[in-house]
């Protein structure tokens, strides 16, 4: 591990309980996969609730979904998929030790994530304005189906939980930029960036399911 | 070898660093295990006091010491604290944290910082839940059934938030353990050489990571139900209160196996050591834990036979529930088979293992009664159910926790406790437990409903017997606390392996050094090779143990 460029790239210290760096890397990666499984199960509860009420009130879902702005949803889908690309490029740049490029790509990812949230903000405020609110706060008069409030409860819970994950993602990627600036990563150690990449792709995939389920009901 | 020398000079994990801050900021799995133990036991004391007050109130058919609303809050907190803060984390976080890396020959769990974070998450969850006690409290029962939990006044949100937060501790601990078992086994420690406690912990961790997130989203939705009136569980705007029950039991049924599987693990370690015989049916015990974990996810409907489930669904859930008895029976018979023909030593851990076998078998078999549809309709929501799950949770998990605490106490603290005191306490707890809960089977069969503040006068005698039993249990636990604390202060110094056990945790000084092992062990065999003329230590270069 010791070489002359140590001062430029501080060597990551392998945890004392691991035999070597590759064991540590593998453990971290497995841990992240297991964590994502728990995330799937948490979102799973909401998807099951969505499915059950869709089975109970199919016409209501069709009627209520017209209130969602499909074009904005589609735009956000494109924005998030692009952000997954920039994140993947950031991971690959980190692995090859290209610090500047990695930081640029992570900044681009954060920019796209913010774009997603801005679009979401306009969507939400439109719904607040129209009274398309969860449960008891529902006050819209155009969609008269008495069960319609349930659809918006699910809409806000599902996109809300996803939105919280986007916010956490922005925080994590910012932290990765900070650590990159501190020269913590190199070709030999890039685990945190790769794991944040996993997380970000997961957040992206959840949206890829949410978009058709909520916006494209027929 | 320098480590071995320092260890010989008395450097161990307890005195490796000093001061309160060195404990609060430690990432050593052994210290974290002890911090969990202290916290879990504190909550056990709180939940136990509630239990005593509940039993005291039921001494007379009418008001004894509290009014009905106070009583409702009492049993809610007793249930919520005991389930979420005591029995679920009891064995994995205390014994599991302490032992898992040691049994694997590792220096720590895979993610030590995450492990410490899990502890603080657990602590925060507990503080949220108990903070509500000092406000208006909650009276929903630990199951938070809708729509009552949406409408009732009180600080239900705080309790829900507490359980939600504590759940993440459970998830992260499970995650940590799974990766630890995969990645940190000592050289030569193949899967078929793993101690059965490790197998049981693995199966438990799988349930923790798969079931707990569903509880998290369920409780989050219920909080939203109270804050935003989202209506998903509220029939008033087309929601479905039974959906809440489905979600809740999708976690909470597997959760009972989170409670009991680690107990199976402890008993599987204790019985061969004190029978001086190789464990019978190693693979059967190891795999049956996974069978139970699997079946755990497809039986939740048996909590809802009278909640408007279709008859076909009820029939299926009833049938699958009975299948749970098969892998469980495999374990019980394997333990009995291990004892058969062995030279049994009646030390305190073994006595508790016997207590476990007796009480858990009663609890498990009455579970089969309750799985039977026609019987269930008669017994549902009666004291029969209360007696059944106390026999499993207290008689099973708590007995095993006590077996484990007595078994590993010398390893953890390097001190021996008084064996005769331990026997007296064991007797008090075992007898007290049966006196408390056996009458409740009869009361339930006679139709006394659970969760009521008063009862019909003809149930008085059995209720009074039950209340007296609760005092015996309390006396047993107080006595246990007394002699264990006395042992901590002035107990005899424990040898490194007082029971001549074979798992790796015993092949290191008591208390263990900071890094667990002076030299990383190289494993050559499974840890159950007990023979009439001694035992074979499964480590390269180790001398065999005498008989």
Image (cartoon, rainbow, N blue to C red):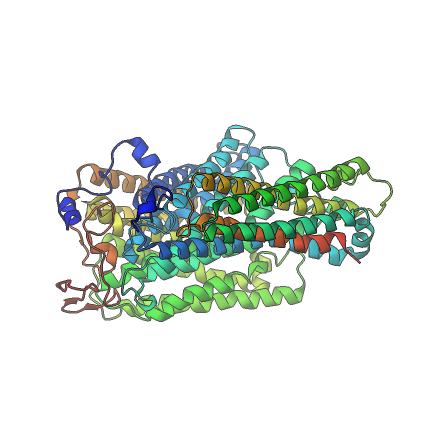
Nearer the observer, B493 or A154: A154
Residue A90 % position (x, y): 53, 49
Specify whether B182 is left or right of B244.
left
> Is B465 positioned to the left or the right of B538 in the image?
right
Q: Quadrant of residue B191?
A: bottom left
**Image location (x, y in percent) of residue B225:** 66, 41
| Position in image of residue B497 (x %, y %) | 18, 54
Front-most of B362 and B202?
B202
Extreme residue toward the top, this view: B135
Outermost residue to the front: A4
Tell me if residue A80 can be seen.
Answer: yes
Viewed as shown, does residue B132 lie left or right of A142? left
Tell me the residue at 25%/55% (across/down). B505
| Count of numbered tags | 0
A60 in relation to B22, above or below = below
Q: Quadrant of the C terminus of chain A?
A: bottom right
Q: Residue at x 50, y 41 (%)?
A: A177
Q: Quadrant of residue B222?
A: top right
Left or right side of A37 for B536 = left
Task: Report whether residue B449 is seen.
Answer: no
Task: Pick whichever, A40 or B371, lies toward us.
Answer: A40
Residue A67: image location, x then y, percent: 81, 46
Looking at the rendering, which quadrant does residue B198 occupy? bottom left
């Amino acid at each position: 591990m010791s070489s002359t460029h140590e001062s430029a790239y501080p060597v990551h210290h392998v945890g004392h309980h691991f035999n070597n760096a590759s064991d540590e890397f593998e453990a971290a990666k497995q841990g992240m996969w297991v964590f994502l499984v728990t995330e799937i199960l948490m979102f799973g509860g909401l998807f099951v609730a969505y499915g059950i009420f869709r089975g109970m009130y199919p016409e209501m879902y069709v009627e209520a979904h017209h209130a969602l702005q499909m074009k904005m949803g589609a735009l956000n889908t494109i924005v998030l998929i692009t952000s997954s690309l920039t994140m993947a490029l950031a991971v690959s740049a980190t692995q090859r030790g290209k610090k500047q490029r990695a930081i640029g790509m992570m900044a681009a990812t954060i920019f796209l994530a913010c774009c997603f949230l801005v679009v979401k903000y306009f969507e939400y405020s439109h719904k607040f304005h129209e009274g398309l609110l969860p449960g008891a706060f529902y006050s819209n008069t155009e969609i008269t189906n008495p069960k319609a409030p349930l659809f918006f409860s699910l809409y806000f819970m599902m996109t809300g939980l996803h939105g919280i994950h986007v916010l956490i993602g922005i925080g994590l990627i910012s932290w990765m930029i900070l650590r990159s600036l501190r020269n913590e990563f190199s070709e030999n150690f890039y685990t945190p960036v790769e794991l944040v990449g996993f997380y970000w792709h997961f957040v992206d995939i959840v949206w890829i399911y949410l978009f058709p389920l909520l916006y494209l009901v027929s | 070898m320098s480590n071995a020398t320092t260890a010989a000079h008395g450097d161990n994990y307890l005195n490796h660093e000093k001061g309160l801050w060195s404990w609060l900021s430690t990432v050593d799995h052994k210290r974290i295990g002890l911090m969990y133990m202290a916290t879990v036991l504190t909550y056990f004391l709180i939940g136990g006091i509630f239990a005593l007050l509940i039993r005291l109130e039921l001494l007379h058919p009418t008001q004894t010491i509290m009014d009905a609303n106070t009583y409702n809050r009492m049993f809610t907190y007793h249930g919520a604290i005991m389930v979420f803060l005591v029995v679920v984390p009891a064995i994995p976080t205390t014994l599991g944290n302490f032992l898992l890396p040691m049994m694997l020959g590792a220096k720590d769990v895979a993610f030590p910082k995450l492990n410490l974070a899990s502890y603080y998450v657990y602590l925060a969850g507990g503080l949220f839940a108990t903070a509500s006690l000092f406000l208006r409290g909650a009276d929903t029962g630990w199951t938070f059934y809708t729509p009552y939990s949406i409408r009732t006044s009180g600080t239900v949100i705080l309790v829900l938030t507490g359980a939600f937060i504590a759940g993440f501790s459970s998830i992260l601990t499970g995650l940590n353990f799974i990766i630890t078992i995969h990645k940190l086994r000592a050289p030569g420690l193949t899967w078929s050489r793993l101690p059965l406690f490790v197998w049981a912990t693995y199966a438990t961790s799988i349930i923790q990571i798969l079931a707990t997130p569903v509880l998290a989203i369920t409780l989050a939705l219920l909080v939203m139900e109270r804050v935003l009136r989202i209506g998903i569980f509220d029939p008033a705007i087309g929601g479905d209160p039974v959906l809440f029950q489905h979600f809740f039991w999708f976690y909470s049924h597997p959760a009972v196996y989170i409670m009991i599987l680690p107990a199976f693990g402890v008993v599987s370690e204790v019985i061969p050591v004190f029978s001086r015989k190789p464990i019978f049916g190693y693979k059967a015990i190891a795999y049956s834990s996974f069978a139970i974990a699997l079946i755990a996810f497809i039986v939740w409907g048996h909590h809802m036979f009278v909640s408007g489930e279709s008859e076909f669904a009820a029939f299926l859930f009833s049938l699958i529930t009975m299948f749970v008895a098969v892998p469980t029976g495999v374990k019980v018979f394997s333990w009995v088979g291990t004892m058969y023909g062995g030279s049994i030593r009646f030390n305190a851990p073994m006595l508790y293992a016997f207590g476990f076998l007796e009480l858990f078998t009663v609890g498990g078999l009455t579970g089969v009664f309750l799985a039977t549809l026609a019987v269930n309709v008669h017994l549902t929501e009666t004291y029969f159910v209360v007696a059944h799950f106390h026999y499993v949770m207290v008689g099973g998990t708590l007995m095993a926790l006590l077996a484990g605490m007595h078994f590993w106490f010398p390893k953890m603290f390097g001190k021996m406790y008084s064996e005769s005191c331990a026997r007296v306490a064991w007797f008090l707890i075992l007898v007290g437990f049966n006196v408390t809960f056996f009458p409740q089977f009869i009361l339930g069969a006679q139709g006394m409903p659970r969760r009521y503040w008063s009862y019909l006068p003809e149930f008085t005698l059995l209720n009074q017997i039950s209340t007296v039993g609760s005092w015996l249990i309390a006396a047993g636990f107080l006595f246990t606390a007394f002699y264990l604390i006395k042992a901590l202060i002035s107990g005899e110094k424990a040898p490194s392996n007082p029971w001549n056990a074979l798992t790796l945790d015993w092949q290191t000084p008591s208390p263990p050094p900071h890094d667990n092992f002076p030299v990383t062990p190289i494993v050559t065999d499974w840890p159950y090779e007990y023979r009439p003329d001694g035992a074979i230590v499964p480590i390269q270069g180790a001398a065999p143990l005498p008989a």
